[in-house]
Amino acid sequence: MNEQSTFDEVKRRLAEIHYLGRAKALFDWDERTMMPPGGAESRAEQVAALVRVRHEKLASDELGRLLDELQPFGEELSYESDEAALIRVARRDHEKARRVPVELLAEMARAASVAENVWREAKRRNDFGLFLPHLDRNVYLRLRYAHCFEREHVYDPLLDDYEPGMKTSEVTAILADLREALVPLVEEVSPRAAEVDDTFLRKTFPVDGQRALVRRMLGALPMPSESWRLDETTHPFQMSLSPTDVRLTTRYDEDDLPAAVFAALHEYGHGLYENGVDPALDGTPLGRPTSLGLHESQSRMWENHVGRSLPFWRRFYGALDESFPGSLDGVGAEGFFRAVNKVQPSLIRIEADELTYDLHILLRFELECELFEGELEPRDLPEAWNERTQSYLGIEVPDDAHGVLQDVHWAGGDFGYFPTYSLGNVIAAQLWEKAREALPDLDNQIEAGDFEPLREWLREHVHRHGRKFSAAEVVERATGRPIEVGPYVRYLTSKFRTLYG
Amino acid sequence: MNEQSTFDEVKRRLAEIHYLGRAKALFDWDERTMMPPGGAESRAEQVAALVRVRHEKLASDELGRLLDELQPFGEELSYESDEAALIRVARRDHEKARRVPVELLAEMARAASVAENVWREAKRRNDFGLFLPHLDRNVYLRLRYAHCFEREHVYDPLLDDYEPGMKTSEVTAILADLREALVPLVEEVSPRAAEVDDTFLRKTFPVDGQRALVRRMLGALPMPSESWRLDETTHPFQMSLSPTDVRLTTRYDEDDLPAAVFAALHEYGHGLYENGVDPALDGTPLGRPTSLGLHESQSRMWENHVGRSLPFWRRFYGALDESFPGSLDGVGAEGFFRAVNKVQPSLIRIEADELTYDLHILLRFELECELFEGELEPRDLPEAWNERTQSYLGIEVPDDAHGVLQDVHWAGGDFGYFPTYSLGNVIAAQLWEKAREALPDLDNQIEAGDFEPLREWLREHVHRHGRKFSAAEVVERATGRPIEVGPYVRYLTSKFRTLYG
């Protein structure tokens, strides 16, 4: 075979692997939005089979041999070319897959599936002991997984699955910088924030009105209507089957209007990233977002930088008011904006305000590192959790359901995932600062409902690249700087000092 | 390896193949119920990749070698045992797959996907010429496919994909018998049927009322609510991801109440079959219905034998009346029953009454055979279609949209599919006759809303076997007779002579 035909054969094999991954994504989406409960048992087997077949293809000797053959070809090409990136990323995926025995992968999937069901029950019954053996098992299996790889730090291989190329030491440094800036800022702002009136948010907002409002808002944002759909689920998420088949979700609770609105904007940000990947990359390993951190930067940008801004509510306050006739009398755009930005240290991560959110992440990241370094036993997690909540957020944890059992991640075996939330916040602010430089009229555009310039800037500098570049490379190319907390701290300081005088 | 471990390894491989098939089923379901239009292009590639990977695994040398090793083991077992059936059915699937080059399969899938889109446009524009080149291509590819197999008749391999083990000569005989009985019966009944009052069915029935009625009816039929869901689509279908994950669909048109009701009952019958397969067979090639003919026997039984019966409408007339207050004044259960059984030769198969339905199938089956025997060219289909419609149904075809272009099957390349509809009718009546013998109180049970005895009889004699036995074997075991038209002709004659005095 000559180089071109070897390259074509590699592409064909990678397409199969990519589409097997999309089939698993559809199973996951369906499980969380559509599947009747009776489907659960078979679904676990269906997903396990797809994971196995995909892994087998990705780790195959034959793919390795073809990639070896292509190595000199790839090295001659420009680093920026689609072809070079494809060979580079495919080799990385292949080499990672080869290190992990398929039985371990299957066992991780199975243990996670069982643990998630037990966790649900344990959370409901506020019984950490019930969950503990499954947590033990997940930690043990992830430790075995980490030991499949060469590493500086035992946590590196876990982190790498979500944030390719990022090291534990880098995240530690970023989060330390963040902690140093956030803790005093929270202390400064909190007392004054307590005076903000958000009592009207405790009203009942009928679900039909929430649905109408969310549809109106999403319909006014720039993503072609034939390329996405919106469904309802318990824990909102976004999943894409192709750049033009984006599945958004949100949840409606008549006692929690902000949950529906901001989850929808958050998932929209994720979806817009997927939608903006260069269509030429679809069907290849490059045709997806490059890391969870960068993914989260897009969702947090639309949720917070756009969605919790005053210009945004100047735009949508009319729609909001029309959706709940009489409920918001006298509140006004500015009152609503202030209420949805009220700072208040709280127990639950997903309900946290923008300023205290990262303290929740810091806590989880530290505990995860200690778990995998062997400095903390799973059985001691609740105590460590509660102590650190007191120390970072200044609040008492009343029970494990509102503490260590609150998130699904550890039940799902997703260690290494949490820090990508804060990386997302950091990157979002860094990109946002740069976008504002390029679009000096951005506030007015948002207030006028013209989101196209922002979308175009994001597409050009972030979305279109797919997995061609790492998150760090994307940020460097877009902003000329490595990932750094400066812009995020400036953004938070400016926003909350302005808000609270 | 000893026999048991070889058997386990074969089962593991077959499970993978089975679940890859279910992943394709989910893609298909999603495409027709959920997918945003933007997903179409990528979906074709996603499905093609799954088809290719599944075929590769099914046709693999290694699976063949393992099945060879198991041959003596399988022959020692009772024909009725799950293990013997698994080996038998897997060998059959494997040998069929080996005969077909994967490139031909992929090309058939691709051509069908293109042809379906062109067909939609051609039907809309009433332009057979637009569709013709794609029809030519489909026929050519299916002819190549048929030539991959040894055969008595060129149509046999096509038929075998839908009705395993059935020969063209057998279908020809069954349909000839049917034609001989049906044509005079239609002639006898039609003039008197014209007097039946069904004008009230032309009223507008609000879609919300139809939805409520269909939910009430399906909710009263025996299938656990956690095992199925109901969605809306243009062309109703049923698809199952496992025996306890059944996806029903129907369509709502305010000008066509019977369409929604009878499509829902039809798809329910399909779903109940899937739901009744022995759970121990899930995840193996035996865990699905055995043929389209037997599948259709179950849907037609619930649609017609149950759903178009007087006891059924005595049961559900109240619900019907409540769903459309004031619309049915004075009609009554018997009036409704008579109206939905009005015999009237018509142009469109899916709108045909029970008595003339099979004449539509006969016409298609004959044309398909002639096409593949080379006695009819695709370009001459419209003329042949129109002549035969005149001859069998006594009506003039006004244009191709209401004639040769009405069904999607030939666009999808599904030659060999149509006769399974009539086989389904024939088998339904044969099983129904036997079920009535076993359940002499069946009419009263239906009128009392007690469908359990019927479900149990069907599960015991039909559903639970999955693919362990062929349709002919299932019928023989359940009724003691080969598939034969006698019971169907007796049923139609008795029903319509009674109806029309």
Image: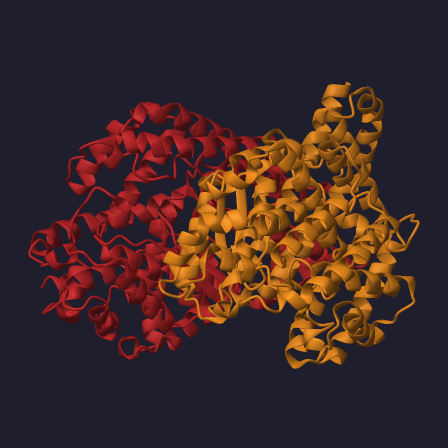
Chain colours: A red, B orange
Question: Which quarter of the picture shows residue B123?
Answer: bottom right
Residue A3 in view in this figure: no
Could you tell whether B371 is left or right of B348 in the image? right
With respect to residue B99, does A281 lie above or below? below
Measuring 70% from the left and 25% from the top, which residue is drawn there? B8
Question: Can I make out residue B120 in this image?
Answer: yes
Where residue B294 sits: x, y (%)? 70, 44
Residue B453, image quadrant: top right
Q: Residue at x 74, y 55 (%)?
A: B417
Identify which residue, A186 or B190, lies in the foreground: B190
**Near-viewer residue (A123 or B377):** B377
- The quadrant in which the C terminus of chain A is found is bottom left
Q: Position of residue A178 (x, y in %)?
A: 27, 50
In this view, the residue in front, A146 or B238, is: B238
Coordinates of residue A98 in the picture (x, y in percent): 63, 38
User: Can you name the residue that lies furthest to the front here?
Assistant: B501
Q: Is residue B171 above or below residue A301?
A: above
**Quadrant assignment, res A416:** top left
Q: Depth check: B248 or A151 in front?
A: B248
State the image coordinates of residue A14 (x, y, percent, origin top left).
66, 53
Point 82% across, 62% down: residue: B368
Left or right: B160 with respect to B248? right
Q: Which quadrant would the N terminus of chain A be assigned to in this image? A: bottom right
Q: Say how many tags the image has.
A: 0
